Image (cartoon, rainbow, N blue to C red):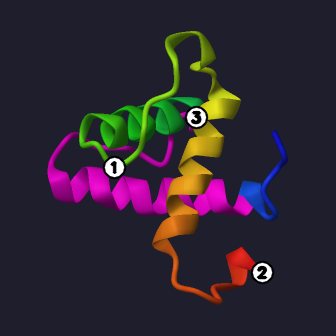
Amino acid sequence: MKKLKNEADLVREALRVGTIYVEKRKAGKINASDPAKKKVEFIYRLLVHDNLIQPLEKNQESEPNMKRKLALWISRQLPTGHKLLC
């Protein structure tokens, strides 16, 4: 699988936007002190539950794959020409 350009930055943006989504949806609270792994998994599972992203196969559920899914999700949410998409 080819790595996305700016994937780390896209994941950071996905965590930022995902945290806002979680709070607006009132699905829980993500604290800044929570480990990144926990944030990634929580946001990934919520987006899957809400049918906003397609789930990974059970044997493919790992942190790097979840991060990639979040990066792909946020890249589709950003407007054309956004600095992270260049």
Residue visible at 35% across and 43% down in the picture: 47
Q: Amino acid at mark 2?
A: Cys
Q: Residues within 10 Å of mark 2 (few under 14, many from 20)?
A: few
- Residue 28 lies within the magenta run: yes
**Quadrant placement of the C terminus:** bottom right
Which residue: 15% across, 48% down? Answer: 26
Position of the N terminus, as image quadrant, is: top right
Left/right of residue 50 with respect to residue 6 in the rendered view: left
Magenta portion: prevailing SS class: helix
Q: Which span of residues is magenta-colored?
A: 9-36
Give how far across and how far down residue 46 sits, in percent. 31, 38
Residue 84: give x, y in percent of width and height.
Answer: 70, 75
In the displayed structure, 44 sits above or below 14; it is: above
Checking the image for residue 66, the label placed there is 3
Residue 34 visible in rendering: no
Q: Which residue is mark 2?
A: 86
